């Protein structure tokens, strides 16, 4: 069993789709590094520190995942550099639909060119969570819709506070 896998993303906010990928990966790896991207070319709803706090509350308070097995960090580097830092050769990526595949395929190829020892592992979330995206969750909550089927209680609280 490989020890550590890196799961990079924006997590703006974390959804049950992301959580499915994390839970499934915990069956395959001893430790998961949930790496919250903080690159400047994105237009985030939440700051990196807010997203880290939201992810930690969702994973550790709402879901009671083991803090020894999941680390939540922010990063501004290449994901391949993050792999070196955490001595991992596995990047985790979630796939929802065929439309995700082309982008993810290209990203995996670029990461492989940057470091030939790194493999990208694609995981599907459960069927009921495959349609969930952070973008849609933000739009629904902004329009006062019910997002309980899409994310955790603490994340919903953070979203509602942001839009008040």
Image: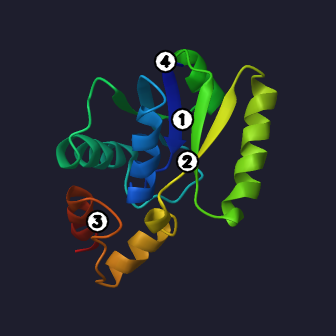
Of mark 2 and mark 3, the one earlier in the sequence is 2
**Alpha carbon distance from label 4 to label 2:** 30 Å
Residue indicated by mark 4: 3
Of mark 4 and mark 1, the one earlier in the sequence is 4
Of labels 4 and 1, the one closer to you? 4
Look at the numbered discs 2 and 3 and tell me whether their residues touch, using CB distance below 8 Å: no
**Alpha carbon distance from label 2 to label 3:** 21 Å
Residue shown at 53%/17% (left/top)? 85
Look at the numbered discs 4 and 2 and tell me whether their residues touch, using CB distance below 8 Å: no
Residue 143: tell me if it is visible: yes
Disc 2 residue crowd, few under 14, some 14–19, many 20+, Cα 10 Å: few
**Alpha carbon distance from label 4 to label 3:** 34 Å
Look at the numbered discs 2 and 1 and tell me whether their residues touch, using CB distance below 8 Å: yes
Disc 1 residue crowd, few under 14, some 14–19, many 20+, Cα 10 Å: few
Residue indicated by mark 3: 159
Residue shown at 34%/26% (left/top)? 69
Q: Position of residue 113 (x, y in %)?
A: 81, 29
Q: Position of residue 129 (x, y in %)?
A: 45, 64
Of mark 4 and mark 3, the one earlier in the sequence is 4
Label 4 residue SS: loop
Of labels 2 and 1, the one closer to you? 1
User: Is residue 52 positioned above or below 3 on the image?
Assistant: below
Residue indicated by mark 2: 40
Residue 78: tell me if it is visible: no
Label 3 residue SS: helix
User: Is residue 59 positioned above or below 161 on the image?
Assistant: above
Give the numbered dot on residue 76.
1
Work out whether residue 162 or residue 72 is closer to the camera in this orientation and state it.
Answer: 72
Disc 4 residue crowd, few under 14, some 14–19, many 20+, Cα 10 Å: few
């Amino acid at each position: 069993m490989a020890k550590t896998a890196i799961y990079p993303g924006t997590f703006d906010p974390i959804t049950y789709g992301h959580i499915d990928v994390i839970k499934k990966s915990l069956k395959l790896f001893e430790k998961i590094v949930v790496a919250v991207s903080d690159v400047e070319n994105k237009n985030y709803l939440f700051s990196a520190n807010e997203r880290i706090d939201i992810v930690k509350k969702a994973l550790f308070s709402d879901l009671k995942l083991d803090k020894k097995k999941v680390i939540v960090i922010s990063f501004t580097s290449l994901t391949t550099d993050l792999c070196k830092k955490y001595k991992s050769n596995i990047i985790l990526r979630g796939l929802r639909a065929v439309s995700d595949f082309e982008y993810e395929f290209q990203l995996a190829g670029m990461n492989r060119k940057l470091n030939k020892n790194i493999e990208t592992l694609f995981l599907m979330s459960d069927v009921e969570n495959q349609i969930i995206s952070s973008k849609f969750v933000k739009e629904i909550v902004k329009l006062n819709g019910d997002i309980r089927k899409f994310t955790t209680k603490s994340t919903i609280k953070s979203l509602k506070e942001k839009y008040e």
